Image (cartoon, helix red, strand yellow):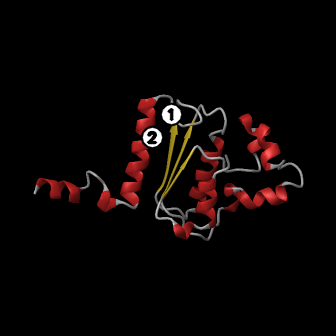
Amino acid sequence: RISSVGNALVRRPDLWGAVVCAVPLLDMRRFNKLLAGSSWMAEYGDPDTADWGFMQQYSPYHNVDLGAKYPPLLVTTSTRDDRVHPYHARAFVKRLEEAGNCEGLLYYENIEGGHGGAADPKQQAFMMCLYIEFLCKTIGKDYAPFSEQKQATLAA
């Protein structure tokens, strides 16, 4: 459940050309106060005890490096996620915005759907297209199926 994507981003931002972080669990200090989070304390620990000393090391929200340069990032969540509260995505994006060290920071919150971020196959397809478009525009410009270069090649 914990966002391995979020941890990869904050620990080694230099490794990534762009990152998609979907319906993430990012704030390990507050996860137990939101929705199903309290049921995960046996797995992650109790941040309101001495466990926090260890948990802080893998809490992406608490490990944003103000001196780092983060790659383009798309963070998505769902307003109706009944497992991981959208707070995690919202707060993480706000922290990165305030730090001002993430060019190309984008946020999308689906007002429907659940933990998967989509309510039905149409929304699932939309979310997948959103991810692909973001990645094509950031790291795959030459590989985008409908890029100007590809269209020119097909027209020739």
Residue shown at the point (44%, 33%) measured from the top left? 123
Q: Position of residue 82 (x, y in %)?
A: 65, 32
Q: Amino acid at mark 2?
A: Met
Is residue 43 shown left or right of residue 25? right
Indicate whether 83 appears above or below 59. above
What distance separates the C-alpha of mark 2 from that of mark 1? 7 Å
Mark 1: few/some/many CA within 10 Å (<14, 14-19, 20+): many
Query: Residue at position x 61%, y 71% from top?
Result: 67
Residue designated by label 2: 127
Say which residue label 1 marks: 118
* Quadrant showing the C terminus: bottom left
Q: Which mark is residue 72?
A: none
Q: Are marks 2 and 1 in contact (CB under 8 Å)?
A: yes
> Where is residue 42, by image quadrant?
top right
Residue at coordinates 43% horizontally, 43% vertically from top-left?
128
Amino acid type, residue under disc 1 in the picture? Ala
Q: Residues within 10 Å of mark 2 (few under 14, many from 20)?
A: some
Q: Earlier in the sequence, mark 2 or mark 1?
A: 1
* Kind of element beneath mark 2: helix
Residue 43 left/right relative to 138: right
Residue 126 rendering spot, x and y as whole percentages: 41, 38
